[in-house]
Image (spheres, helix red, strand yellow):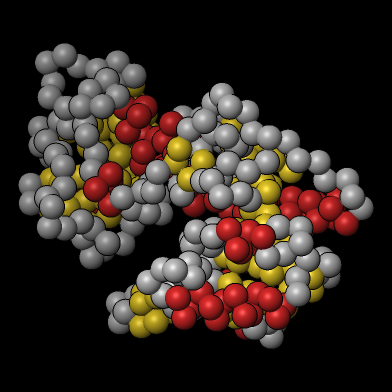
Amino acid sequence: MKIIFAGTPEFARIALQALLQAGYAVPLVLTQPDRPAGRGMKLHASPVKQCALEHGIPVVQPRSLRLDGRFPEDAAQARTAIEAACADVMVVAAYGLILPQWVLDAPPAGCLNIHASLLPRWRGAAPIHRAIEAGDARTGVTIMQMDAGLDTGDMLLCEAMDILPDDTTAVLHDRLAHLGARLIVQALRQMERGGLARVPQPKDGVTYAHKIEKAESLVDWSRPAGEIARRVRAFDPFPGASTVLGQENIKLWNCEIDSLEGFADVPSGHILSISDAGILVACGGGTLRLTVLQRAGGKRLAAADFLRGFDVRPGMVLGSVPRDGAAE
């Protein structure tokens, strides 16, 4: 079986590596154009492109696949490459471009997507972040037959896993990436044997995982402690939960729920106490102990180290981040 692979970040690279290790022929890889990154803003190849080049696989990086869009020359080049590959199926994982109908119809077996949620819950761009943010107890991976809708295609395989109490998006991402890699190999094996059944998604339980925006990082201390703690975990590594003390921007990378009961006479964001164990903060409901923090331009530090270089005292009040900056 010959496979065209379309993907961009590390989540997709792990799947591509698994397909190659399973012995599948991959004559073509589609990935996003190189992007500037780092302090020097130099162009960097995506993890999928790096993997493809290491294995000598031709790579095409269209800015769009719409033949009638802004970059028709890119789409035409991709179409020529896809047709020349003569693949049986396309596997898609976190690619980042919408596939028009001509792409969906190009391989005889269509396009299979590795989606990091239990569909139909968390269709869309950020299913891992949103599952943690919402306090879901479980998530998983769905292998889906792609159609023209947003993650609406028939389900082919699905496997669940627990979301652990201390899971961040970074940690859960890695577990799901390996699960997705295993499931796509399993799906293709079953397809080769003719035993891959298509199951329409339920009409009930549909939710959408909208793209994470930097503005969401601002901590609203009037919210319950449990909700804020989930957002801290959900926004690690991007965009990071943010607050401000005085004129200083601070990122919050880890915290512990100290109490679920609040203080009626203490304003939200009020620092109640400090110790090497962390900074205790009053929330709209309950209290949080901030245990890993980062100043602008600095590194992530445990609370004890953070407090040695920053004047923090009980009675100070944490607020939202000014519009013009945040810790990087």
| Residue 101 picture quarter | bottom right
Horizontal and vertical percent position of residue 269? 17, 32
Horizontal and vertical percent position of residue 244? 15, 46
Residue ID at (36%, 41%) = 232
Q: Residue furthest front?
A: 68
Residue ID at (54%, 71%) = 31
Where's the C terminus, which quadrant? bottom left
Where's the N terminus, which quadrant? bottom right
Q: How many marks?
A: 0
Residue ID at (28%, 44%) = 216
Q: Residue furthest left?
A: 246
Q: Give whichever of 56, 242 is nearer the camera.
A: 56
Residue ID at (60%, 63%) = 102
Q: Is residue 50 above or below residue 138?
A: below
Horizontal and vertical percent position of residue 325? 16, 58
Q: Give whichever of 139, 59 is nearer the camera.
A: 59
- Horizontal relation, residue 172 to residue 269: left or right: right
Q: Is residue 17 visible?
A: no
- Horizontal relation, residue 139 to residue 284: left or right: right
Horizontal and vertical percent position of residue 190? 86, 50
Q: Give whichever of 257, 7 is nearer the camera.
A: 7
Q: Is residue 34 above or below residue 243?
A: below
Q: Is residue 160 above or below residue 302?
A: above
Q: Residue furthest bottom?
A: 56
Q: Is residue 288 visible?
A: yes
Q: Give whichever of 128, 154 is nearer the camera.
A: 154
